[in-house]
């Protein structure tokens, strides 16, 4: 289970070091291989352990391909998906296409999201965070799935 926020730097070649705590979580699951793909709703990347990605990909492949929205989603998620194996220093290479999609620069934010991680350009995340803080979640407009959640 991935949680927490990590400020990390990407080098000029597009490599970034997976934080030690995240690597330890991956090792605890017996996984080291990752899959990086785009988030089709936000300009960030999603980083999945390979086993989690395979579950997601099977669900995607089971969807009907005649629906244009589903085809678009599959093209984005599977088209950008890149296998990443950390090197001896715990770094992964983010593909140029993924870096461009997410506008990644040197400063990045890696955020745990349960079974996956999100990778944001730091400035993009800070702008999104500021927007979230300007418009707090309205308790009156909560989706039904959240109404029974007790925090």
Image: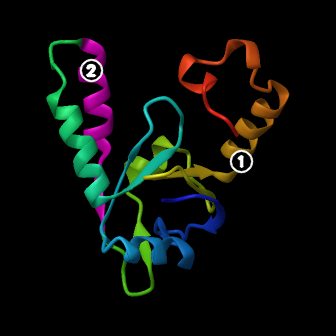
Q: Which residue was labeled with disc 1?
A: 123
**Dot 2 or dot 1, earlier in sequence:** 2
**What mark, if any, has residue 93 been given in the picture?**
none
In the figure, residue 134 lies in which quadrant? top right
Q: Kindly tell me whether residue 87 is visible in this rendering.
A: yes
Residue 80: image location, x then y, percent: 31, 44
Q: Using a 10 Å C-alpha cutoff, classify the residue at mark 1 as few (fewer than 14 neighbours), some (14 to 19) or many (20 or more).
A: some
The percent position of residue 49, horizontal first and vertical second, equals 34, 60
Given residues 89 and 34, the one toward you in this image is: 34
Which residues fall within the magenta stretch?
A: 68-84
Q: Position of residue 99 (x, y in %)?
A: 47, 51
**Identity of the residue drawn at 75% across and 45% down:** 126
Q: For residue 4, which quarter of the picture?
A: bottom right
Separation (CA) of disc 2 from disc 1: 30 Å
Label 2 residue SS: helix
The residue drawn where x is 19% and y is 24% is 63
Kindly state the secondary structure of the residue where label 1 is placed: helix
Residue 97 image position (x, y, % from top left): 38, 48
Residue 19 shows up from this direction: no
What residue is at 31 percent from the left and 53 percent from the top? 52
**Side (left or right) of 37 relative to 63:** right
Magenta stretch: helix, strand or loop mostly: helix
Residue occupied by mark 2: 70
């Amino acid at each position: 289970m991935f949680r927490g926020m990590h400020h990390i730097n990407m080098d000029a070649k597009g490599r970034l070091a997976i934080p030690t705590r995240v690597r330890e979580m991956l090792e605890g699951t017996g996984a080291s291989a990752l899959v990086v793909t785009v988030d089709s709703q936000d300009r960030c990347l999603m980083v999945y352990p390979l086993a989690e990605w395979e579950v997601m990909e099977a669900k995607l492949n089971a969807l009907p391909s005649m629906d244009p929205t589903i085809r678009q989603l599959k093209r984005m998620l599977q088209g950008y998906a890149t296998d990443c194996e950390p090197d001896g220093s715990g770094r992964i290479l983010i593909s140029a296409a993924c870096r461009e999609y997410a506008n990644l620069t040197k400063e990045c934010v890696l955020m745990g999201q349960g079974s996956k991680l999100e990778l944001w350009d730091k400035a993009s995340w800070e702008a999104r965070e500021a927007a979230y803080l300007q418009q707090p979640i309205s308790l009156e407009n909560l989706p039904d799935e959240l109404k029974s959640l007790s925090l």
